Image (cartoon, coloured by chain):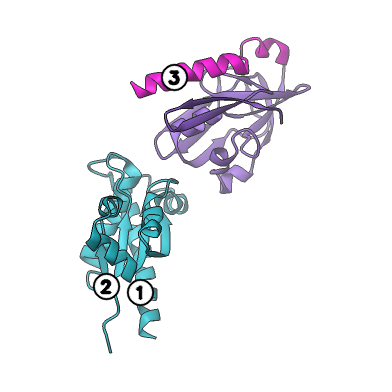
Chain colours: A purple, B cyan
Amino acid sequence: MSGYLEYTFDKFTFKVATDRFYTPEGVWARADGDQVTVGVSDFLQQRNGDVAFVEVWEEGSAVSVGDEFANIETIKVDIELPCPVSGQIISVNGALELEAEVINQDPYGAGWIAVVEAADWTADRAGLMTPEAYLEHIKVQAQEDAE
Amino acid sequence: MSEPRKVIIVPCSGIGKTYGSVSREAAYEVIEDLRPDSSQLVALSMLVLGEKTARDAVACSPAITIDGCKLACATKMVKESGGQVAQDFAVLDVYRRNRTLKPKGIAELNEGGQQLAHVLAEEVSEVIDNLQGDEDA
């Protein structure tokens, strides 16, 4: 795990892990070769509250960029998560079935959601936000939420 | 033999929050219907304000807290007020065990929320019975 960028707004501090890429919705992707682990950002989990349940598409499911690959139910909202990468889901974090709160506790680590065997990671990565860009994005979102 | 002390119930004060509403509905059901003779409600806001009657109540009797989120304000305030938390409940944990009872609504809970509040109230009542039983022993 590398470092974090941080943004403090009011009483909240949001961390952005610097070793991965992001969708504007707050889904992160971290590649190890063609295997891309995906999860949700600290901003997304803090913004939406305690996670009650997580449902992830089954291993073997084909996904495309922007497709829903999982949904999470929090105490505030139900969120459909868009996949940041095209390919096939090869692994799902089974721990989330019994302990969905891990997403709140460790969104960049133990709270990972799935691993996708990417069809073309290089191409998909070009459409994602860098940590620096995502940090700027959440600054705007946090401001808008407060208005 | 003296009467067992009433168990203090302190629910979440989150107004405008669904899970806060579930916690309060559960507390109302306990003190009004299920265990009116053995439980007493203390408003979290009174503890926050440092109101003497409320602080004395939690300082002198076992308390059950019902929190609407992980901030656990009810539990924290009882402890900060010198009280002893006999059992802390979190609405989310009860919901995870009863997934079909999805709560919605704020001012007025949906049926799932009302049923979830009832399940929670039953669980709180069991704890009250155990606490009262311990005092009788």
* Type of secondary structure dominating the magenta stretch: helix
Marks 2 and 1 on same chain: yes
Q: Is residue B7 visible?
A: yes
Give me the C-alpha separation between circle 3 and circle 2.
Answer: 48 Å
Look at label 1 and name its amino acid: Asp
Above or below B129: residue A100: above
Residue plotted at (65% across, 36% down): A109
Would you identify the image quadrant in which residue A39 lies? top right
Please state, as top left, top right, bottom left or bottom right, where the C terminus of chain B lies in the image.
Answer: bottom left
Would you identify the image quadrant in which residue A28 lies? top right
Residue plotted at (31% across, 44% down): B14
- Where residue B67 sits in the image (x, y, percent)? 38, 51
- Residue marked by disc 2: B38
Q: Is residue A125 magenta?
A: yes
Above or below B129: residue B27: above
Look at label 3 and name its amino acid: Gln
Q: Are marks 2 and 1 in contact (CB under 8 Å)?
A: yes
Give me the C-alpha separation between circle 2 and circle 1.
Answer: 8 Å
Q: Chain of mark 3?
A: A
Look at label 2 and name its amino acid: Ser
Q: Which mark is residue B129?
A: 1
- Where residue A89 sits in the image (x, y, percent)? 67, 29
Q: Nearer the viewer, residue A35 or A90?
A: A35
Q: Is residue B49 left or right of residue A11?
A: left
- Secondary structure, mark 1, is helix
Q: Nearer the viewer, residue A15 or B112?
A: A15
- Residue marked by disc 3: A141
Q: Are marks 3 and 1 in contact (CB under 8 Å)?
A: no
- Secondary structure, mark 2, is loop
Q: Is residue B16 left or right of residue B83?
A: left
Q: Which residue range is magenta in the image? A: A120-147
